[in-house]
Amino acid sequence: MPIPPPDEFSQRAREVADDLFEEIADDIRPVAADHAQYHLDGSNLTLSYEEALRWVKESVDAGHPQVRHFIERLAPGVIVNLAAFEDPDSQFHP
């Protein structure tokens, strides 16, 4: 499946990403969310802020609208763990 351009993500994907990164910013304050590294749960992948933002939107639009996080490490360097889950009651599952 081709990846849509950033402006073609659904409204829900943009809202989930906005809410998630606001929560992350609150959790890691005073460090800015765009200065953290993002680890995809269950993998060896670490993403930048921009990559993580896109991953969240892609996950929501792919039918995994419940994206959660936890702080793996605050120092040295902030690492935030991200995981996306299916929602069997969501609009993405008929």
Image: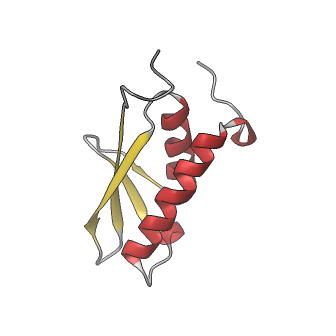
Q: Judge left or right: residue 39 versus residue 12.
A: left
Seen as rendered, the residue at the extreme bottom is: 30
Q: How many marks?
A: 0
* Colouring of the image: secondary structure
Q: Tell me which corner region of the image, top left, top right, bottom left or bottom right, holds residue 87.
A: top left
Foreground pick, 36 / 30: 30
The residue at the far front in this view is 89
Q: Quadrant of residue 43?
A: top left
Quadrant in which the N terminus is drawn: top right
Q: Relative to 68, does residue 65 appear above or below in the rendering? A: above
Residue 77 vs 40, above or below: the answer is below
Q: Position of residue 61 (x, y in %)?
A: 55, 32
Name the quadrant containing residue 84: top left
Which one is in front, 87 or 85? 87
Residue 93 picture location, percent across and down? 45, 19
Residue drawn at 45 percent across, 29 percent down: 90
Q: Which residue is rendered at x = 36% and y = 45% of the image?
A: 45
Side of 3 relative to 82 (left or right): right
Report the residue at 41% width, 62% height from top.
37
The residue nearer to you, when weighing 64 against 1, is 64
Q: Residue at x 50, y 61 (%)?
A: 21
In the rendered view, would you say 28 is above or below 63?
A: below
Tell me where residue 30 appears, x and y as whole percent.
44, 84
Q: In the image, is 87 to the left or to the right of 16?
A: left
Q: Is residue 11 left or right of residue 31?
A: right
Instruction: Residue 6 in the image: state x and y as whole percent.
Output: 70, 42
